[in-house]
Amino acid sequence: MKFRYTIMYVENVEQTLAFYEQAFGLERAFLHESGDYGELNTGDTKLSFSSLALMTSLGKHPSSGNPHSPNFEIAFETDDVAGNLANALKAGAELVQEVEEMPWGQTTAYVRDLNGYLVEICTAVAG
């Protein structure tokens, strides 16, 4: 078994891909001609987006979640949390937590993306 991809359900796949490119410096790997599905180049495990409309048409009854009560997060590891946080905010992310040093030796910050999903920007865990 191999963890292949995470698919987040969004209103607008094209806008979401553009946001992640600008906010986090990721590259677009694929956008289906329908505009209902796209992927970012994130290594072996893909970060993907599917439109709420497509998932509804497939009978999946999707929800984009509650941005003020998240039930998951995605995380991007970097050596420059503050710089990447500034880029994300400039691209339109909403600040959730400023840069903080955690007791376990990790630096973290949190934002919400344009869909309200929680995104952690962090260093590797020390040790």
Image (cartoon, rainbow, N blue to C red):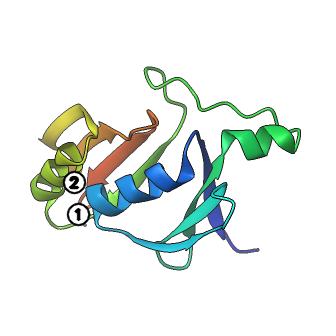
Relative to residue 90, is residue 11 drawn left or right? right
Q: In terms of sequence position, does the residue under pointer 2 or pointer 1 come before the other? A: 2
Where the C terminus falls, by quadrant?
bottom left
Residue wearing tag 2: 106
Instruction: Write down the quadrant of residue 123 in the picture.
Output: bottom left
Q: Residue at x 28, y 55 (%)?
A: 23
Q: CA distance from mark 2 to mark 1?
A: 6 Å
Residue 102 visible, this angle: no
Q: Residue at x 77, y 44 (%)?
A: 55
For label 2, count other residues whose C-alpha is less than 10 Å away and answer few (under 14), some (14-19) or many (20+).
some
Residue 106 visible, this angle: yes
Q: Residue at x 66, y 67 (%)?
A: 33
Mark 1: amino acid: Ala
Where the N terminus falls, by quadrant?
bottom right
Relative to residue 105, is residue 26 drawn left or right? right
Q: Quick check: marks 2 and 1 in contact, CB under 8 Å? A: yes
